[in-house]
């Protein structure tokens, strides 16, 4: 009898041990490498609750993601698009109209200001029309991607903001969304007014999640809904003309991540919504991930192709719904957003 009890105890102990080892291994593959460092990030106030369990999901709430690409780089079409196609994901591409079709040499000209896109080949109209025809969203990202929109004369501002919509229209590409170059102008009343004349929405940055009721941007705002103007007359942090995206490149540059660390950070960001999206309830939070170049150049605003592939695979393998910017709708009655399909 004593022997039998001992054997049972031994078997149970070995089983538990092997389960623990397996769980730890799987967990280690997905959890952050250096949680104390990452938890300290100013952009990640929600991150300490986001440990990933072995199934890749720690709630039954819906898991969403929106993918954005800025500046119209050719590598988005040649390198990112095939990976998106593999999973059936659609994205939003924000185009700088006067850059379309330019070669790397042409992008080096003196008329192009010194920014990350200088000297980098751009998509052609054919590429952009192809994306649009296949269900990707095209957004406007101004005519020339200038730094000084906040000090521009009215007619120049109208050209940069208004004409960039007409420029897309001329290619039969209809858009409702503008993205601010350098994220500048979202808090400037003149610019926001100009944007609102041509677009229903605008995207800015920079925060890991967009909240559909705009009420959790704790570090930046104490707003309780998404109205554009606060009672004190100032423009709110998040509103229909300041839908908040998360700059993948900004985090990598600021924290010197290698690709493994960046994948950890990506997983942490996309799982941040688990705290807010509850089972049976409409979604409340969405990560809007903003990329620039997708190539192996190692440039500052570039994501290596294998890393991008791993990130998209993570979304696919963990049952994320990759939706579009056009699925975010503003409700004037409640001054908040809702999703088209909810
Ligand atoms: Zn840009």
Image (tube, helix red, strand yellow):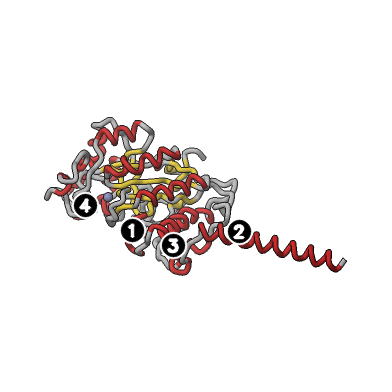
Q: Which mark is residue 44?
A: 3
Mark 1, residue position: 250
Nearer-the-camera pick, 18 or 29: 18
Q: Residue 110 in the image: state x and y as whole percent.
A: 11, 50
Q: What's the residue at 50%, 54% (across, down)?
A: 271
Mark 4, residue position: 149
* Earlier sequence position, callout 3 versus callout 4: 3
Q: Residue 248 in the image: state x and y as whole percent.
A: 37, 55
Q: Quadrant of residue 132?
A: top left
Nearer-the-camera pick, 175 or 262: 262
- In three-dimensional space, the C-alpha distance between marks 3 and 4, rounded to whole angstroms, equals 29 Å
Is 116 left or right of 202, judged from the image as shown? left
Name the front one of labels 2 and 3.
2
Q: What's the residue at 48%, 62% (across, down)?
A: 32
Nearer-the-camera pick, 11 or 38: 11
Mark 2, other Cα within 10 Å: few <14 / some 14–19 / many ≥20: few
Mark 3, other Cα within 10 Å: few <14 / some 14–19 / many ≥20: some
Mark 2, residue position: 22
């Amino acid at each position: 009898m004593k022997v039998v009890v001992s054997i049972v105890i031994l078997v149970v102990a070995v089983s538990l041990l092997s389960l623990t080892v397996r769980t730890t291994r799987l967990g280690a593959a997905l959890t952050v490498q250096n949680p104390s460092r990452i938890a300290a990030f100013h952009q990640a106030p929600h991150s300490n609750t986001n440990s990933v369990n072995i199934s890749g999901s720690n709630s039954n709430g819906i898991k969403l993601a929106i993918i954005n690409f800025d500046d119209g780089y050719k590598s988005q079409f040649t390198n990112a698009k095939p990976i998106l196609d593999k999973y059936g994901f659609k994205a939003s591409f924000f185009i700088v109209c006067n850059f379309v079709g330019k070669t790397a040499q042409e992008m080096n000209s003196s008329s192009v200001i010194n920014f990350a896109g200088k000297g980098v080949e751009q998509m052609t109209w054919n590429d952009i029309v192809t994306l649009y025809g296949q269900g990707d969203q095209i957004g406007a990202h101004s005519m020339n991607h200038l730094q000084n929109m906040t000090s521009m004369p009215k007619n120049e501002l109208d050209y940069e903001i208004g004409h960039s919509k007409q420029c897309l229209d001329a290619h039969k590409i209809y858009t409702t969304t503008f993205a601010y170059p350098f994220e500048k102008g979202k808090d400037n009343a003149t610019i926001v007014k100009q944007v609102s004349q041509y677009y229903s929405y605008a995207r800015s940055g920079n925060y890991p999640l967009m909240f559909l009721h705009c009420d959790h941007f704790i570090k930046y705002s104490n707003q309780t809904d998404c109205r554009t103007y606060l009672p004190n007359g100032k423009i709110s942090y998040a509103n229909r003309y300041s839908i908040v995206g998360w700059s993948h490149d900004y985090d990598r540059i600021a924290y010197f991540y290698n690709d493994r660390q960046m994948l950890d950070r990506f997983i942490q960001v996309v799982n941040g919504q688990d705290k807010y999206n509850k089972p049976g309830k409409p979604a409340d939070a969405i990560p809007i991930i903003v990329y620039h170049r997708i190539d192996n150049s190692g440039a500052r605003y570039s994501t290596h192709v294998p890393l991008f592939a791993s990130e998209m695979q993570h979304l696919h393998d963990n049952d994320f719904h990759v939706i579009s910017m056009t699925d975010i709708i503003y409700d004037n009655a409640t001054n908040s957003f809702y999703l088209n399909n909810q």
